[in-house]
Image (cartoon, grey):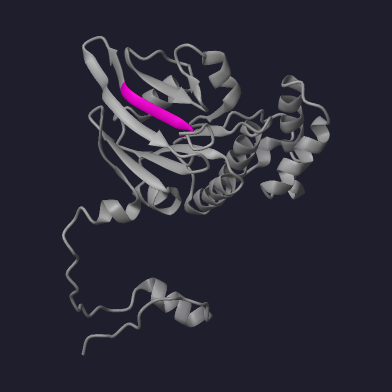
Amino acid sequence: MTARQAPAIEVRGLEKSYGKSRVLRGVDFSVARGGIFALLGSNGAGKTTVVRILSTLLKADGGVASVGGFDLATQPANVRESISLTGQFAAVDEILSGRENLVLVARLRHLSRPGKIADDLLERFSLTDAAARKVSTYSGGMRRRLDIAMSLIGNPPVIFLDEPTTGLDPQARVEVWQAVKELAGRGTTVLLTTQYLEEAEQLADRIAILHEGRIIVNGTLAELKRLLPPAEVEYVEKQPTLEDVFFAIVGGERKSASVRTEK
């Protein structure tokens, strides 16, 4: 297998315990370059622990892993240069403007033309109109988009998004989903942890379910759906919902099956 074909992330037998509590019990998965991989699980399943280990913030008790072609145990500095991590809460300075946040990070990374880098990212994440505003005035979705934009400064080939839409309203969540899709479209490898089933369904090329410290299933959405018996189609009559009434009154477009009322 050539370096170009090798997975962006490869994990084999990852283990981690806290005292007598075994959080990870031999986790195995790989992530293709340029793909979106969703690690799905409930609170306490070990998702954040996996991300912290892969981003070199935490040492594993056992197993091997590579990120960006670099061994996690023997080449941690190379791993850190290849990744960016966006945690569960936006790490932005609310006193500064959106543009100032981006310029600051670019300067800290000793990159040339930090203003140009900031302007490009503001345009890419649809934040140009709010560039001069203090981040304290941003909505939740705008803050999260800015946070992701900041993590892309320096063009890391791999980005970890640890539950990026936690606490966001539905509209803000959709905004973040679009930003993540654009990342992958530009060739960035994304490992996404989430507890939202719809989020994994909307974004991921492959989905792994982490349960009690183990990956219990791993595949595409279509492959996971084939694990269940074929759906039985039943005809059910229903009354119009308030949503149906709303769209009928305001004349908005709605793609749905026609609704029959009971006689």
Residue 159 quadrant: top right
Looking at the image, residue 57 lies above or below residue 67: above
Q: Position of residue 18 (x, y in %)?
A: 29, 12
Q: Please give left or right for residue 181 compared with residue 217 in the image.
A: right
Q: Position of residue 80 (x, y in %)?
A: 56, 20
Looking at the image, residue 223 lies above or below residue 250: above
Q: Main secondary structure of the magenta part?
A: strand
Comparing 80 with 32, the one in front is 32
Q: Position of residue 57 (x, y in %)?
A: 47, 16
On-image quarter of the C terminus: bottom left
Q: Please give left or right for residue 166 compared with residue 210 in the image.
A: right
Q: Please give left or right for residue 83 compared with residue 257 in the image.
A: right
For image coordinates 29% across by 30% down, the residue present is 45
For image coordinates 46% across by 81% down, the residue present is 248
One can see residue 132 in this view: no
Q: Position of residue 29 (x, y in %)?
A: 35, 33
On-image quarter of the N terminus: top left
Looking at the image, residue 188 lies above or below residue 252: above
Q: Is residue 160 magenta?
A: no
Q: Is residue 10 magenta?
A: yes
Comparing 19 with 54, the one in front is 54
Residues in magenta, as a range = 7-13
For image coordinates 41% across by 78% down, the residue present is 245
